[in-house]
Amino acid sequence: MLDDGKVLVVEPVVPPGNAPSVSKTLDMMMLVLQHGGRVRTELEHSALFAAAGLHVSRIIPTASPLCVIEGIHR
């Protein structure tokens, strides 16, 4: 990846707090159907990107339960 390159990931993001959310329902489904799979929070996505030497520059919500997560070089 070039220094000015970007990585775009399309994933649901679990919002903070206890309010109901489609992402939280998807998270429960992933736990059951994918043998421990899960939907990540913004903080968890940031940690995953950091482990790859990237920084989450922004998370763009969409009209669906999915978000576009943009990662750039640190």
Image (cartoon, rainbow, N blue to C red):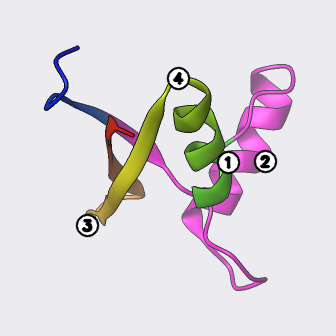
Q: Which mark is residue 44?
A: 1
- Work out whether mark 2 precedes mark 1 in sequence or the reverse, and give the earlier one: 2
On whether residue 18 falls in the magenta region, the answer is yes
Could you say whether the residue bearing mark 3 is in a helix, strand or loop? Answer: loop
**Looking at the image, is mark 2 or mark 1 nearer the viewer?**
1
Could you say whether the residue bearing mark 1 is in a helix, strand or loop? Answer: helix
> Could you say which is closer to the camera, residue 50 or residue 15?
50
Q: CA distance from mark 2 to mark 3?
A: 21 Å
Q: Which residue is mark 4?
A: 52
> Could you say which is closer to the camera, residue 45 or residue 63?
45
Q: CA distance from mark 3 to mark 4?
A: 28 Å
Amino acid, disc 3: Ala
- Work out whether mark 2 precedes mark 3 in sequence or the reverse, and give the earlier one: 2
The quarter of the image holding the N terminus is top left
> Could you say which is closer to the camera, residue 56 or residue 26?
56
The stretch in magenta equals: 9-38
Q: Which mark is residue 28?
A: 2
At a point 33% along the width and 34% down the height, the residue shown is 73
Amino acid, disc 4: Ala
Left or right for 61, reference 50 = left
Q: Image height check: is 65 above or below 74? A: below
**Position in image of residue 61 (x %, y %):** 31, 65
- Work out whether mark 2 precedes mark 4 in sequence or the reverse, and give the earlier one: 2
Q: Which residue is mark 3?
A: 63
Left or right for 42, reference 63 = right
**Position in image of residue 45 (x %, y %):** 58, 45
- Work out whether mark 3 precedes mark 4 in sequence or the reverse, and give the earlier one: 4
At a point 84% along the width and 32% down the height, the residue shown is 32
At a point 61% along the width and 71% down the height, the residue shown is 15
Decide: few, some or many residues near mark 4? Use Cα within 10 Å; few <14, some 14-19, many ≥20. few
